[in-house]
Amino acid sequence: MNSGYAQLLALLPVRHPMVLVDRVTGFVRGRTIETAKAVTGSEPCYQGMADDLPAERYAYPRSMILESFGQSAALLWLGSRGGRDAAADSLPMVGRLRNCAFSGAAFPGDVIRHRVRVERLVDDNAFMCGESRIGDQVILTVGSLIAVARPAAVVTGG
């Protein structure tokens, strides 16, 4: 898989400001993906924050870390299926996250590294797990992510 940003855009069904993966750093088709997400102070979630807040208030939202992990999982799945063209009539969606545990936080200047592993692929369903790290510290463990592909016409009402 090409690790360039244009390739990410070609695979993901989201656009700025919701693209939360910056680079693919490792990819084994049908098995694993490693991605990077740089957290910056110019992210939309930091707009309008007061200057005198305590440092912990600048923690990157957990929901955004989960979304970034989910986008990494989508890249693994779509890249393993031959890209979006191979599934042009369907949209990938997270169906369920289980056994998720946060054990740290991310702040502007940090680079979150996601590692997602495929446990099983069955028809239009993917079962994955993994973790997110900053340096050597695990900040998120995902015990199970279940993704589904549904017809685009049904999802978008088209």
Image: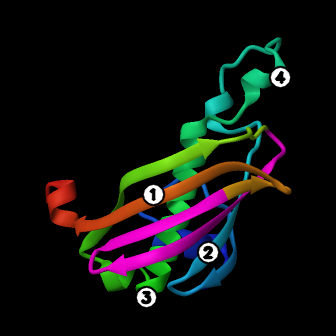
Circle 3 SS class? loop
Helix, strand or loop: magenta stretch: strand
Front residue of 36/40: it is 36
Q: CA distance from mark 2 to mark 3?
A: 15 Å
Q: Is residue 27 above or below residue 17?
A: below
Identify residue for label 4.
55
Which residue shows up at 43% across the image and 88% down it? 82
Q: CA distance from mark 4 to mark 2?
A: 32 Å
Identify residue for label 1.
14
Q: Earlier along the polypeptide chain: callout 2 or callout 1?
A: 1
In the figure, is residue 101 to the left or right of 54? left
Report the mark closest to the observer, 2 or 3: 2
Q: Is residue 93 above or below residue 32?
A: above
Q: CA distance from mark 3 to mark 4?
A: 43 Å
Residue 110 lies, in percent from the top left, at 81, 47
Give the residue type that dot 4 points to: Ala
Q: CA distance from mark 2 to mark 1?
A: 19 Å
Give the residue type that dot 2 points to: Ile
Q: Earlier along the polypeptide chain: callout 1 or callout 3?
A: 1
